[in-house]
Image (cartoon, rainbow, N blue to C red):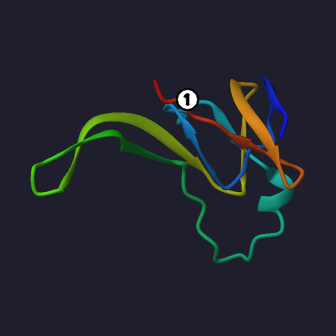
């Protein structure tokens, strides 16, 4: 598997690290094909756990969170720099844990 870093507008239906609520545009070619009653909503931003602690009972408790954006199939990023790999011929975003 080769790793690449660069700008891309091709990430779709994927969670990407960070809050990109103001850095996207609609892919009008896809929107034109939607049924008339389809809803168009902005990308989803969630504060997701990225690190955990375990209690003595084995219970997992989140102790560190980061913001992630879910870009559905009808959005395109506006030239944002991020890391990705190609999986089945499509770019997939990466998150580096440290």
As drawn, which residue projects farthest toward the left?
56
Q: Where residue 35 sits: x, y (%)?
A: 74, 77
Nearer to us in this view, 31 or 2: 2
Instruction: Using the image as rendered, state which of residue 36 and residue 86 is in the foreground.
Output: 86
Residue 86: where, in percent of width, then height?
A: 83, 43
Is the residue 46 above or below the residue 94 in the image? below
Q: Residue at x 83, y 40 (%)?
A: 1
In the figure, 45 relative to 20: above or below? below
In the rendered structure, the answer to whether residue 55 lies left or right of residue 46 reads left
* Residue at the disc numbered 1: 96
Q: Residue pushed farthest right? A: 89
Name the residue located 79 percent from the left edge and 36 percent from the top edge: 9
Camera-nearest residue between 13 and 64 = 64
Q: Is residue 78 left or right of residue 29?
A: left
Mark 1: few/some/many CA within 10 Å (<14, 14-19, 20+): few
- The extreme front residue here reads 56
Residue 84 in which image quadrant: top right
In this picture, residue 92 sits left or right of residue 40: right
**For the residue labelled by badge 1, is the local secondary structure a helix, a strand or a loop?**
loop
Residue at the location (85% across, 34% down)?
2
User: Which quadrant would the C terminus be assigned to in this image?
Assistant: top left
């Amino acid at each position: 598997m080769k790793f690449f870093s660069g700008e891309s507008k091709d990430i779709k239906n994927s969670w990407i690290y960070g809050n990109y609520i103001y850095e996207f545009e609609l892919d009008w070619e896809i929107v034109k094909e939607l049924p008339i009653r389809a809803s168009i909503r902005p990308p989803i931003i969630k504060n997701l756990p990225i690190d955990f602690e375990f209690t003595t009972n084995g219970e997992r408790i989140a102790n560190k969170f980061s913001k992630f954006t879910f870009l559905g199939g009808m959005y395109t990023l506006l030239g944002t720099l991020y890391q990705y790999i190609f999986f089945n011929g499509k770019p997939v975003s990466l998150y580096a844990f440290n």
